[in-house]
Image (cartoon, coloured by chain):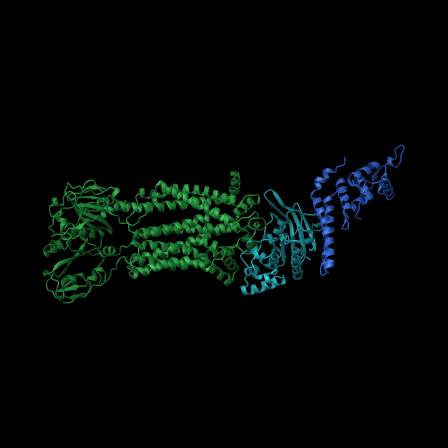
Amino acid sequence: MTALIQARGLRKSFGTTDALRGIDLDIQRGEVVAVMGPSGSGKSSLLHCLAGVLLPDSGTVSVGGTVITALSEARRSALRLKEFGFVFQFGQLLPDLTAIDNVTIPLLLGGMKRRQALTAARGWLDRLGLEVAADQLPGELSGGEAQRVAIARALVTQPSVLFADEPTGSLDSLAAENVLTAMLELVRKAGTTLVMITHDPRTAAYADREIIVRDGQLAATDRVGIK
Amino acid sequence: MAVVDNSLTLLGLLSVEPSYGYDLKHTYDRFFGVRKPLAFGQVYASLARMTRDGQILSLADEAGGGPDRKKYEVTEVGRTRVSQWMFTPDIPSETLQSNLFAKTIIALLVDDNADRLLDVQRTEHLARMRELTREKQGADLMRVLLCDHALFHIEADLRWIDLTGARLTQLRNEIKLP
Amino acid sequence: MNPSVVRLAVIGSRASWGRLLGITAGVAVGVTLALLLGGAYQGLGARDERSSWMYASGEYVVGADTGPGTVTTDMASLGDDRVALAHTTDRHQGDRIVRLDLAAPTTSSVTIPGITDLPQPGEYYASPALIDRIAQVPPDELGDRFGTLTGTISDSALASPDSLVVVVGARTSALIERPAAQIVTSFTDVPHRAGTNYQTVAIVGAIAVLFPVLLLVSIVTGLGAVARRERFATLRLIGATPRTVAAIAAVETAATSLIGALIGVLLAALLGPVAALVSVDDGAFFPSDLAVTPLTTATIVAVAVAASAITAGGRIRRAGIGPLGQTKQQAEKTPSLLRLVPLAGGLGILIATTVAVLAGLPVPRVGTLVVIGFTITTVGLLVAGPYLTLLAGGIMARRSKTAAGVIAGNRIRRTPVDTFRSVSGLVVAVFMVSVFAGAATTANQSVAPDDGPGLLPVSTLIQHLDSTPAATDPARTEAARARIAAISGVTQVTTIFTIDSGEGPDANRLLISADAANDLSLGIVPSAPVVSINSDALRGTPAVFTPAEATDVAELTPRILLIGTNGSPAAIERARTALQAGTIAGTGWMPAGTRTDLADDRLQSMAASFANLAYLGIGVATLIAGLSLAIATISAMIDRRRMLALLRLLGMNLAGLRRIITLEAAAPLLSVMAISIGLGFLVADLILVGLTNGGRSVGWPDARYIGALLASALLALAAVAVAVSRLGKNTDLAAIRYE
C-alpha cells in the first residue's frame, strides 16, 4: 500500500539554523502519528512542510500522489481548504465570530450556502458536546471548549489529513484527555489521518505510532525502512 | 529485571578494557554502587559464571595467582551479549530504571550509540502507554484510574529518558574512565 | 522614572521606529495645515482691515441743499477736511475694479491709506495689478477711463496683490450732481466689512479641515498599538505601575509629536508662498498675510504635543494593561441608541434657529447659533457613526453569504468604534463637501446666462443712463450713440426711452421705436411706430413687444442704451471705455455691463466667494482623510497579522483577505456616507436659510460636487488598495505560531 503522505529528503533552514536536515517519512492513510522531540528540534517545521504551509529548501512532499511542494501557493491554499484541517495550541478562533460562525468559515470558503454551512457546523458542534456554546464568542469559552470548536472547524470539511500542533498543550490533564478522546473518536470513525505534534507522552499514547525528531532528523528507529 | 543486572554490567565494564577482578569491583562501585557497593564474592561468582559461558576468558596467570591476580578479557560472545542487552528495552515498570541507567553508562563507556538505546527504550515505553491507553477505552472508572497511575509512572521514566538524552554529551565527558 | 527604561520601552524594535515615524509624519502634516489655516484666518482679517478704507462713506450730496457747509461746484466749498467721493464698481474683462472718484482741494488734510497725495482732476492712483493691466491693453479699452497715472497704491492698503483698485481725481462739479456722491471726512477708522457671516464661514471651514487633522493624529498615535501593548505588558510584569506605563506612553508620544510639530512649522514656512497663491474672495494673499505670529505658532505646537501625549497616555491607561497583557481581546462597549442624541441636538439647534428666523422672531446672534449647531452636528455625526456602523455590521454579519462577508461583518459588529474611526475622516469630509456644495448651489444660480432666440445677446452691453439733465438730453444721447456706434466691434446701438410724465398707459414702461425694435431681431414687433419692451428682457427672459401709445420717440426721455457688440472682449471694453469717457454715463453710476456682469452683481453671494476656499479645504480634508484611512487600515492589519495568517492557513486566498479588509472599510463608509450626504444638504439649507432670513435655499449640486464625491470614493479605494497591497508581507504563515 502506498503511503498517503510521503516526504523525501526534506531540508529547510532559517538563516543559519538548519531546521530540517534530510527527513524521509511515510504516513499511511488513516494512521494516527504523534510527532515528538525536544523544543527546537524541527517538529513544527516538519509539520508545516507536510501541510504545504512552508516550502522546503529541497526535498518533496506528496499527499495522495500529488507532489504538493511543486504546487503554486493558490493551489496549496485550495488543497489546505479541501484536504487538510488544522488545530493549534490556542488562539486560533476568530475572536469576533461566534463558535458556530467560526466553524462555518471553511465551508463558506468552499462555496457552501450559509444556511447549509450553519446546519453542518451545528452537527459537528453537537458531536463535540458543544450544543450550548454555539452562539458564544471565543472569549467566553473555556480552553477545552475553544479547542473542541477548533477541532470542529478543522473537521467540518471532512479533510483527509488533520494536522494538530500541541492541540492540548494549554489544557489541564482532564480537559486534555476529554478533548483528545473526542478528537480521536471522530478521526478514527472518519478514517482521517492525524499528524499531531506533542511533547506529552500521554497524548502521544493515543497515536498508532510516534516519530521522534531530533536536530532536524528522525530518530533512527523511525527512519523509513527500519522496523 | 528492573534492578541492575550485575553480571551484564560487569561484562559491559570488561568490554571497555581488560581488567582485574579487584579493579572491576571498584569501577563498578564508582558508577553504580554509590549506595550499595558490590561484595567481592558476588564479583568473583559472576566472573566464574561468565568464564564458564565463554563470555570472558582469563589472561595468563601471573605469579602467586589467586583469583584476584587474574586479568579478564571479554570475548566476541561476551561483546554480542552486552550489545544484545543494551539494545533490548526493559519492560516499563514502576520502579526506578537503574538497569537502563547502567546500560546508558556502559554504552557511553564502550562508545556505543546511547541515543539509540534511549530511543529503543522510549519506543517500548510508548508502546506500553498505548496499550494502557487502549485499555482505558470503555473501561470502568476504577480501571481507568489504575491505568492512569501506570501511565503517569511510565511518563516519569520517559521524562527521565528525554532529559538523559539531552544530557548525553555532558554525561559522556564526565564518566571517562581514568 | 528611569530614562533608560523609557529608551528600552520605546525604541525596542524596528517596528516601533516605523510607528514613531508615522506619528511624526502625521503630526507634521497636521501642524502644517493648522498653521496655514491659522495664517489664512488671520490673513483674511488683516486684508479686510487693510482694504476697509475703500468702503468709506458719508452723507450723500443733495444737489439742491443750500444750508451751511453746502458743497458747491467750487472745490473750495469742501474745505480741507472734507472730500466728495463716488464709489463705482467698474469692470474689465469680467473682473471688478473698485473705482473711487474723488474731489478735494490740493490743500485737503484728508488722507487715503496707501497713497501720498490725493489725486487732482485728471490724475489717478492705481493698484499694481491694475497698472499692469492698463499697460497690457490698448488705452481705448481701459486706460482712457481714468486719466493720467500719477502714483501707485501701496500694498499696505490693498487686500490682495490681485486687487484692482483705482482712485481717480475729479472736479466737484462733476461729482456733485451724481446721486451716489458722498461727502467723506476720513478714510481711516472705517469699520471693516468682515461680518459675522464671513466669520461663520471661516470658522466652519477651519472645523472642516481641522477635524480630519485631529483624526489623523489620533490614528497615527494608535499605530502598532497591539505590539506596543505587549511591550508595556512586559514592563508591567517586571514591576512598572500603570501610571509609569501611561507616563512612558505619553512621554514617547510627546517627544515624537514635538519633532513632528517642529517639522510642521518648517513645512508651513516653506509652503506659505504656495498657499498664498490660492485665490480667496478678492484674490490671492500676500505671503506675509499667511505668516503666523510666533505666539500662535508656539500655541499650536504646544496644543498638538499636549493633545497627542494626553491621548496616548489616556489610551494606555484606559486599555488597563495588566502584567499579563491582554490575552483576550478587550471587548468594546456596544454603542447604544444614545449615540444619536448629539446629532439630533445639533440638527435641533439648526432647525429651531431656521424656523425662528423664518417666523420673523428676533433671534440674537444667528451666526453664533449656526456655528454652534453646525459644530454639534459634525461632532454628532462622529458620535453617531459607531452606532450606525454597528447596525451595518449586524446586517452584514447576518445576511452575508461569503466567508469574507461573515468575517468582516462580525468584526465590524464587535468593534464598531475602531472600525468607524478609520473612516470617520472621510465621513466628515463628505459631510463638509455636501454642506459646501449645498451652500454653493446658491452661487450656481448665477451661472452664465443663456443665449438664444428672443433673448438679448449676452454680448450686448446695457448702459443705464444717468438721471442728470445732461444724460437725458436726447440730442446729447444721440451724439453719444453715434459716437459709440462708430467704435470698431460695435454692431448696433439702440436707445430705450421712458415717458417723463408718470401718467397714462406708457408710464413706467420701456419704449423703443419700432424700427430699432426690428433691428434687435428679438421677435415679432407689432405694427406701431413705438413699441414697449418688457423690462425682464434685459435680465434674460424672451423679449415681448407690445404697441405703445406714444408715437414719436423724440418726445421721450432716453434711459437705456443697448450696445450690441461682436462679442469680443476688446469691443466690449472699448465700448465701455467710450461710455465712461462721455458725459451721459458718468461716474458714480452703474457702469455698462452685459447680462453676465449684471447677473454677477445681483447674485454675488457669500457662498460663491468662498467656494474656492471651501473646495480647497475639502480637498485637503479629503486627502488627509484618505491618508488616515490608509494608515488605519495598515495599522489594523499589523495588529491582526495572526488572524490573517490563520485565514490563509484555512485556505483563504489573498483575494479573500483583500475582500475582508476592503469590506471592513467599505461597509461603514457606505452606510454612514449616505447619511452624511443627506445631512450635509439639510444642514447647508438650514445654514443658508438661517443666515439669509430665507433669502436663499439650496439647489442642485454642480459637477464639482459629484467630482468631489467620486474623488473621495477613489481615494478611499486607493487607500485601502495601498494598505491591502501589503497583505502578502503581513500574512506570513509563520505568524500563526510564534507571536
Image-quadrant location for residue C49 = top left
Colour of chain C, in one word, is green
Q: Is residue C681 left or right of residue C111?
A: right
Would residue C251 be visible to someone looking at this image? yes
**Farthest residue toward the top?**
B63
Would residue C704 be visible to someone looking at this image? no
**For this rendering, which residue is in front, C674 or C73?**
C73
Q: Is residue C708 left or right of residue B116?
A: left
How many numbered badges does the structure rendering display?
0
Colour of chain B, in one word, is blue
Q: Is residue B79 left or right of residue C197?
A: right
Colour of chain A, in one word, is cyan
Placement of B56 over or under A181, stated as above or below: above
Q: Is residue C632 left or right of residue C292?
A: right
Residue C631 image offset from top left, x and y in percent: 46, 49
**For this rendering, which residue is in front, C460 or C343?**
C343
Residue B170 image offset from top left, x and y in percent: 70, 39
**For this rendering, which residue is in front, B78 or B175?**
B175
Picture residue at 48% right of the left edge, 50% below the top: C634
Placement of C452 over or under C310, stated as above or below: below
Image-quadrant location for residue B47 = top right
Residue C167 image offset from top left, x and y in percent: 20, 45
